[in-house]
Amino acid sequence: MHQGTDPVAIGPSPWPLTLARGLSPILLAAASSFAQADGIASPLPGATPGDPQRGRAIVADRHVGLCRLCHTAPIPEERFQGDLAPNLAGAGARWTVPQLRLRIADSARLNPATIMPSYYRTAGLQRVAPAHAGKTILSAQQIEDVVAYLATLKDAP
Ligand code: HEC
């Protein structure tokens, strides 16, 4: 599942182009660390340290993150859960915090064909309703909260 990053292969193309087009200015500022790693090393700007309880609530909520449209998560009180994507149980053991942060912020960076939304990206998206133009799906704080929650999910399903 983990795709090793080869710094040499990433260099010339198509990464710099994708980076320049797809990222919000804030993420663009972090682009150098992006290109070298399979994650986003620092917390997103403006966010306080993630709160796992708030993150759990975001993942549990059917209207905020929509995560469980596709994923099952270890949230027993929620009955309807998706099976289009890996079970989130064990995500905190499979991935580091920076890796989780990148996967939530902009999964398309790792897999351009993914159906998972880029939760923290404003440019380069297609079919964005006018009311949502220029807004990320989740705020920086919400991303940090979700990442903090996922990091606690150490047990495989
Ligand atoms: C429309 C479907 C969809 C939605 C909504 C979605 N994801 Fe995903 N997600 C995927 C798919 C498919 C993958 C598998 C990798 C890929 O195709 O990019 C994935 C991969 C992941 C991974 C890495 C998988 C692993 O091995 O643990 C994590 C973590 C993750 N998603 C978390 C979330 C969270 C948190 C949300 C909500 C904020 C969310 N996803 C919303 C479809 C979705």
Image: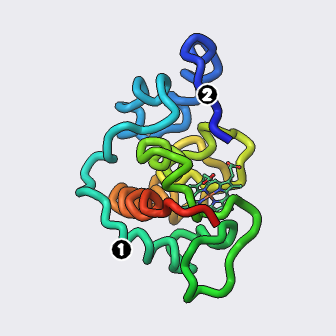
Q: Quadrant of the C terminus?
A: bottom right
Q: How far across and how far down the image is residue 56, in percent?
A: 44, 73
* Among the 4 quarters of the image, the one containing residue 116: bottom right
Residue 106: x and y, percent?
A: 54, 46
* Label 2 environment density (alpha carbons within 10 Å; few <14, some 14–19, many ≥20): few
The disc, 1 or 2, on the residue closer to the chain's N-terminal end is: 2
Q: Where is 76 relative to 86, above or below? A: below
Q: Residues within 10 Å of mark 1 (few under 14, many from 20)?
A: few
Residue at image location 38% in from the left, 59% down from the top: 148
Q: Determine the residue positioned at 69% across, 39% down.
A: 112
Q: Quadrant of residue 75?
A: bottom right
What residue appears at the point 43 percent right and 77 percent down from the top-left corner?
A: 57
- Quarter of the rendering occupied by the N terminus: top right
- Please give left or right for residue 7 compared with residue 152 in the image: right
Q: Which quadrant of the picture is home to ligand 1?
A: bottom right
Can residue 59 be seen in this snapshot? yes
Closest to the observer, 157 or 82:
157
Q: How many marks?
A: 2
Q: How is the image coloured?
A: rainbow
Residue 13 - label:
none
Q: Is residue 122 visible?
A: no
Q: Residue 4 — which label?
A: 2
As drawn, the label of residue 53 is 1
Q: Residue furthest front?
A: 155
- Residue sitting at 49 percent across and 42 percent down? 99
In this rendering, the answer to whether 48 lies above or below 18 is below
In the structure shown, which secondary structural element does the residue marked by tag 2 occupy?
Answer: loop
